[in-house]
Amino acid sequence: MTRFYILLDQQGYRTSTALIII
C-alpha cells in the first residue's frame, strides 16, 4: 500500500489516498 500512496501522492491525491488507506 506504500507504493500506491506514493504513486497517488505524485498526482496530488495525498489526502484522498490517506482516507482510503485509513
Image (cartoon, helix red, strand yellow):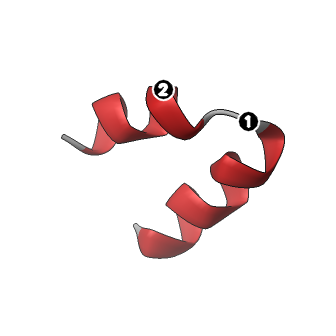
| Distance (Cα) linking label 2 and label 1 | 9 Å
**Residue 12 locus on image (x, y percent):** 73, 35
Residue placed under numbered mark 2 in the picture = 16
**Residue 17 locus on image (x, y percent):** 46, 38
Label 1: element kind = loop
Q: Is residue 2 left or right of residue 10?
A: left
Q: Quadrant of the C terminus?
A: top left
Query: Residue 6 occupies which quadrant of the picture?
Result: bottom right
Location of residue 16 with respect to 11 vertically, above or below? above
Residue placed under numbered mark 1 in the picture = 12
Q: Is residue 14 left or right of residue 17?
A: right
Mark 2 burial class by Cα count in 10 Å: few <14, some 14-19, many 20+: few
Mark 1 burial class by Cα count in 10 Å: few <14, some 14-19, many 20+: few
**Residue 1 locus on image (x, y percent):** 40, 67
Q: Residue furthest left?
A: 22
What's under tag 1, amino acid-wise?
Gly
What's under tag 2, amino acid-wise?
Ser
Location of residue 21 with respect to 19 vertically, above or below? below
Label 2: element kind = helix
**Residue 20 locus on image (x, y percent):** 33, 33
* Picture residue at 56% right of the left edge, 61% below the top: 4
